């Protein structure tokens, strides 16, 4: 879900300028099991995006770093929830 959330944010802004030739989002993490239980640490989101040559592609490439940072810092609710942490309630009905 984290990769999809980031990808949607990035695609929504960059594709207004140019359709990408390549658009891949990869999420990697290390799984640990310790006294606190199973969890993921060192989560990393990598975007591999290529745009066509020309002014439209240049415009998309120019905005890419800013939208990736904005997604991480403000927009992606999945990433923000993971990073800030929030209690989770398990319920059976």
Image (tube, rainbow, N blue to C red):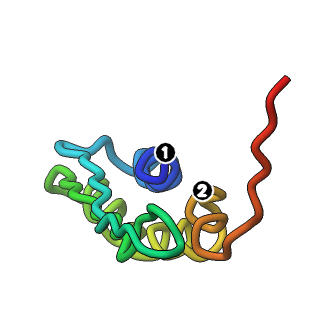
Q: Quadrant of residue 88?
A: bottom right
Q: Is residue 83 above or below residue 76?
A: below
Residue 77: percent from left, percent from top: 66, 58
| Circle 1: element type | loop
Task: Answer with mark 1 or mark 2, whichever residue precedes in sequence.
Answer: 1
Please identify the quadrant where the C terminus is shown.
top right
Tag 2 residue = 78
Q: Residue at x 41, y 51 (%)?
A: 3
Residue 5 placement (x, y as % from top left) = 52, 49
Q: Nearer the viewer, residue 39 or 12?
A: 39
Q: Position of residue 4 (x, y in %)?
A: 45, 44
**Cβ–Cβ under 8 Å for marks 1 and 2:** yes
Residue farthest to the top, as pictured: 93
Could you tell whether 20 is left or right of 2 in the image? left
- Identify the residue shown where x is 60% and y is 56%: 78
Query: What's the CA distance linking mark 1 and mark 2?
Result: 7 Å
Q: Position of residue 49 (x, y in %)?
A: 23, 55
Provide the residue designation for mark 1: 1
Q: Secondary structure at mark 2?
A: helix
Which residue: 74% across, 66% down? 86
| Quarter-of-image position of residue 87 | bottom right
């Amino acid at each position: 879900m984290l990769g999809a959330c980031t990808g949607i944010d990035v695609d929504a802004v960059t594709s207004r300028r140019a359709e990408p030739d390549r658009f891949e989002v990869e999420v990697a993490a290390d799984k640990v099991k310790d006294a606190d239980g199973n969890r993921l640490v060192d989560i990393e989101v990598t975007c591999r995006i290529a745009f066509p040559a020309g002014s439209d592609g240049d415009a998309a490439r120019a905005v890419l770093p800013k939208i990736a940072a904005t997604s991480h810092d403000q927009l992606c609710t999945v990433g923000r929830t993971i990073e800030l942490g929030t209690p989770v309630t398990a319920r059976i009905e």
